Amino acid sequence: MHRLPAHVKVVALLGFVLVVVATPREQVWAFVAYALMLAVVAAVARVPAGFVLPRMLVELPFVVFALLLPLVATGPRVDVAGVSLSVHGLWAGWNVLAKGTLGVFAAILLAATTEPRALLVGLQRLRVPALLVEIASFMVRYVDVVSDEMRRMRIARESRGFHAGHVGHVRVLAQAAGALFIRSYERGERVHLAMLSRGYTGALPVLEEGGASAAAWRLAAVLPAAALAVGATAWVLA
Amino acid sequence: MHVPDGFLDAPTSVATAAVAGAAVAVSLRMARGELDERAAPLAGLTAAFVFAVQMLNFPVGVGTSGHLMGGALAAVLVGPWTAVLVLSVVLAMQALLFADGGLTALGINVVLIGLVTVAVGWTVTKLVLALLPRRPASVVPAAFVGALLSVPAAALVFVGLYAVGGAADLPLQALAATMVGWHVLIGLGEAVITALTVSAVVAVRPDLVYAGRHLQPALELRGADGRVPDQVPAEPDATPDRRRRTGGLVAVGLAVTLLLAGVASFYASGSPDGLEHVAEEQGFLDTARDHAFGDLPLADYGDVGGIPVGLAGLLGVAATVLVGWLVFRLVASRRPDRPAATSDDRERV
């Protein structure tokens, strides 16, 4: 999976997630099947669970929302362990939890097996507008530089005894953010001048070709095809 | 904390993705006008800045911290079209590389965080700027209000999307009240951080703030001996002609309006309009409550006070014209009279 070209992976995973989102929520078995499929892909790509699980915390606020839904939704209610929960809310909460978690899992697998630069090449092959890909390239290239600059500013603040304790300190942090913007923007201007002096005419040269073979497409199609089979069955049974 | 997959159903996700795609396509064209060929590196660096600053945790008291979303800030600093591109790229990279925001929900996230916050933030900033004195420092309070309103606006749009394609049937008023209420607080934090950041930039390089680019005093040419040479004559003014043409249009329009309101209104039909007719037929006409101003003499176009409808019509036209003129004077008086100093963007390098 690490060796597949990025655009193939993006299309495959997007197809997979679309099928997941379109699956009726009552067919719980379908979602278990999807999760197993993703686990198989993770095993084949040798992505350890320790890599995936911490990154799934990003969806925590929506897990909270999904857990609250049965309590606040309207409609017929049912008693679970002494607490009155809305049936609609239970289904809706399950819907959000299942589809959201599967989506996050799929996206983490994509991120774990694709380098950012390769991802950008893939996006370019998928005919994403050139300007957007260029902006993304510069962002990927310079986000480490800008974050590092922010880290150095933080170290400078702390070595002068500043600790962000209460709301009044926001001003200092905002000044740091403002200074960071000025430095980033001026860096952007210098980068532009450097590119001009090396013959930039307005569009970056196309990155390496990296076309995908039919075998690669077939391999990548296995996941969304399997998902489609499960999804179609779920639709028919619903 | 971006919207994950499955939160809104498939048709809504696809529709918002289409809207987002269209908006990004338009912004691609217009951003070139804002930044010409420097768009890619400058927008890219701004995207890196927005990404980095979203990780900056600001203390908000009681042991918690919040972080900036950056829509209004980006709009004020680099202009609305570039801001849409910057935020869309940040959101896409977050979804693809960090699983922050569902792959199928990218359209929703772009609409909410990339479009609504930028559009509302920018429009409100410009409106407030029109009311403030023309100084670079005026951008700061304008950005504050812009950021303050942008966040609840996005929350409202989210409630609207949820009403269309959401999972559970939550009572909409309760959801709207909670979402908007919570996001007004978040908007307050965002407004404070945005205003302080913009003020930090204005203090050092006011020319880098896109929203304030017309507020700079014009450069003054001075000779070697300190004399100010004669001003370069402005381009031949097109205003006399334009004023004459608009003046004629206003006069004719006003005459027609007065005729309709003052004379033709006497011949208007007295039958109930569509809604009233259906209400009578279906029997729910009496559920209508009285208007708060229903007892004033002008109510019901003069019926209550015995004033002839033509006179009521004339008074109405006069009031509308007065209010409209005041509003437009306020907005238009802040536009620069002189031709914009030759692409001040180029001066920056």
Image (spheres, coloured by chain):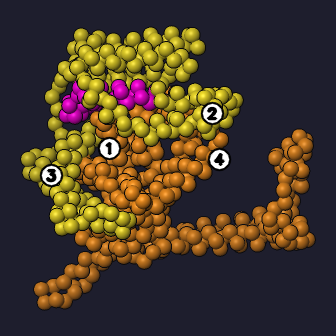
Region of the chain picked out in magenta, as a range: A99-126
Which of the two labelled residues, at mark 2 and mark 3, occupies the earlier sequence position? 2
* C-alpha span from label 2 to label 3: 61 Å
Identity of the residue drawn at 61% across and 28% down: A80
Relative to B121, does residue A233 appear above or below in the rendering?
above
Q: Which residue is mark 1?
A: B90
Relative to B317, does residue A77 appear above or below in the rendering?
above
The chain drawn in yellow is A
Residue sitting nearer the eye, B195 or A11: B195
* C-alpha span from label 4 to label 3: 50 Å
User: Which of the labelled discs sits on residue B173, or is there none?
Assistant: 4
* C-alpha span from label 1 to label 3: 20 Å
Q: Is residue A121 magenta?
A: yes
Q: Where residue B123 sits in the image (x, y, percent)?
A: 47, 59
* C-alpha span from label 1 to label 2: 42 Å
Which of the two labelled residues, at mark 1 and mark 4, occupies the earlier sequence position? 1
